[in-house]
């Protein structure tokens, strides 16, 4: 009896990122649920569960933020580069930090719609990863540059304030 071994070498496990339509479909459903679930009559605005959860003291913002993390995980599975993931995380952090401010944070949440923003980034990753990678690098670079400039300006302002306080105290003696 002949040996029935395969004539080709065994194939390696497929380690390519999962970019299936199911991943995008789930991400779209979550973004819709969190940012656009309920239409506001007479307007083009829609409200999702995310700003409504913000009204629950203590845990509401965290519940919305935890659900929003799914889009970030989906982008990582889709093969998003570090700059895009950082950009998406920045959207979530800004949303979470602003959401901690009573009432104003909820109003910010209505307008910012971090999940919609992250869904667009995820769709761009799937449809045109090279362009998204370039755009994200520029955005992250601009944010880092702006942060350094802001910290520098704040440091100079603090030094001038300290100098003014010390000169005022010295003048009082």
Image: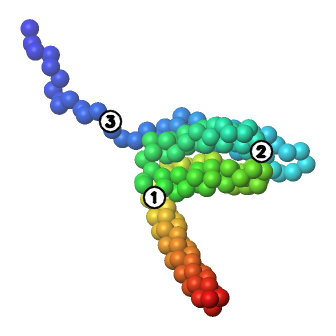
Question: How are the residues colored?
Answer: rainbow
Question: Camera-side residue: 63 or 114?
Answer: 63
Q: Would residue 34 be visible to someone looking at this image? A: no
* Label 2: element kind: strand
| Residue to which mark 3 is pinned | 14
Question: Camera-side residue: 3 or 55?
Answer: 55
The structure residue drawn at horizontal position 24% and vertical position 32%, both measured from the top left corner, is 11
Residue 136 placed where, x, y %? Answer: 49, 61
* Label 3: element kind: loop
Q: Are marks 1 and 3 in contact (CB under 8 Å)?
A: no
In three-dimensional space, the C-alpha distance between marks 1 and 3, rounded to whole angstroms, equals: 25 Å
Quick one: label 1 or label 3, which is nearer the N terminus?
A: 3
* Label 1: element kind: helix
Q: Quadrant of the N terminus?
A: top left
The structure residue drawn at horizontal position 45% and vertical position 50%, both measured from the top left corner, is 80
- Which label belongs to residue 83? 1
Residue 127 placed where, x, y %? Answer: 51, 51
Residue 123 placed where, x, y %? Answer: 55, 49
Residue 52, quarter of the rendered image: top right
Residue 52 vs 131, above or below: the answer is above
Q: Specify whether 160 is left or right of 113.
A: left
In three-dimensional space, the C-alpha distance between marks 2 and 1, rounded to whole angstroms, equals: 29 Å
Residue 17 placed where, x, y %? Answer: 40, 41
Residue at the far bottom: name it: 171
Residue 10 vs 144, above or below: the answer is above
- Which label belongs to residue 47? 2
Foreground disc of the pair 2, 3 = 2
Residue at the far front: name it: 173
């Amino acid at each position: 009896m002949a040996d029935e071994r395969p004539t080709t070498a065994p194939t390696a496990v497929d380690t390519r990122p999962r970019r299936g339509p199911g991943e995008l479909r789930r991400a779209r459903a979550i973004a819709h649920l969190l940012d656009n679930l309920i239409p506001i009559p007479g307007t083009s605005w829609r409200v999702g569960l995310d700003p409504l959860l913000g009204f629950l003291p203590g845990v509401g913002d965290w519940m919305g933020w935890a659900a929003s993390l799914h889009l970030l995980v989906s982008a990582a599975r889709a093969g998003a580069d570090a700059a895009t993931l950082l950009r998406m995380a920045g959207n979530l952090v800004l949303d979470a930090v602003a959401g901690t401010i009573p009432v104003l944070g909820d109003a910010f949440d209505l307008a910012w719609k971090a999940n919609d923003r992250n869904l667009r980034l995820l769709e761009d990753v799937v449809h045109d990863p090279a362009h998204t990678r370039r755009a994200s690098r520029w955005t992250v670079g601009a944010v880092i540059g702006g942060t350094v400039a802001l910290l520098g300006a704040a440091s100079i302002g603090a030094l001038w304030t300290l100098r003014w306080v010390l000169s005022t105290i010295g003048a009082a003696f």
